[in-house]
Image (cartoon, rainbow, N blue to C red):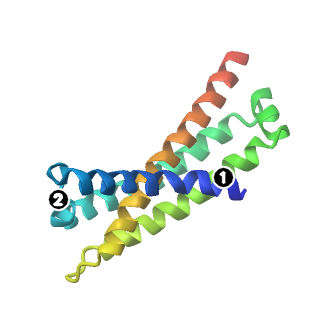
Amino acid sequence: MLLYTFMMLTPGVMLWGLYEGLVYYWPDIALGLGAKRSDIATLVAGFAFSMLGFLATIITVLFAFTHSSTFARYQKRGYLQVFFYIYFLTIICLVLTSILAIANFSNTFYLLSFRLMMIGFMNSLVQIATLTIILCNIARHAVSEK
């Protein structure tokens, strides 16, 4: 499971590092994210809370297919355990991202909390996309069985 944790938490760090590297060599492409941190924090907090609701929907849709042979194969091969691991990791990341977003509303600007919020936001995008693709594949195969 350590590999899955690494895979799910790496994209944000890599994308933020890429952005910082590009800004270092070409300062003109800087987006000025720190100047708009309050607006960005509002957006990220809204995203995190909305995606927590979306995760509740995902699990409901998944349980609708529990009687299909696709779901049984998925469970038998151990993929369901991986799905739930990524699912709970995503919940934890979204909660932490929303806490960091709320922390960015303070009067004191901490660059570390802003960077961690943006990294968490990018990680959450990848995690939500991964869970959505998995669920769509399960649903597609379960529906084609009938």
Q: Observer-nearest residue: 31 or 143? A: 31
Q: Earlier in the sequence, mark 1 or mark 2?
A: 1
Regarding residue 112, the answer to whether it shows in the image is yes
Picture quarter with the C terminus: top right
Label 1: how many residues lie within 10 Å, few (<14), some (14-19) or many (20+)? few
Point 71% across, 48% down: residue: 82
Point 47% across, 61% down: residue: 94
Q: Quadrant of residue 100?
A: bottom left
Q: Observer-nearest residue: 108 or 72? A: 108
Tell me the kind of residue under disc 1: Tyr
Task: Count numbered badges in the picture.
Answer: 2
The label on residue 32 is 2
Regarding residue 49, the answer to whether it shows in the image is no
142 relative to 72 in the view: left or right: left
Please say if 134 is above or below 41.
Answer: above
Point 15% across, 65% down: residue: 35
Please say if 83 is above or below 116.
Answer: above
Q: Observer-nearest residue: 57 or 102? A: 102
**Mark 2: secondary structure:** loop
Q: Can you name the residue that lies furthest to the right here?
A: 76
User: Circle 1 sits on which residue?
Assistant: 4
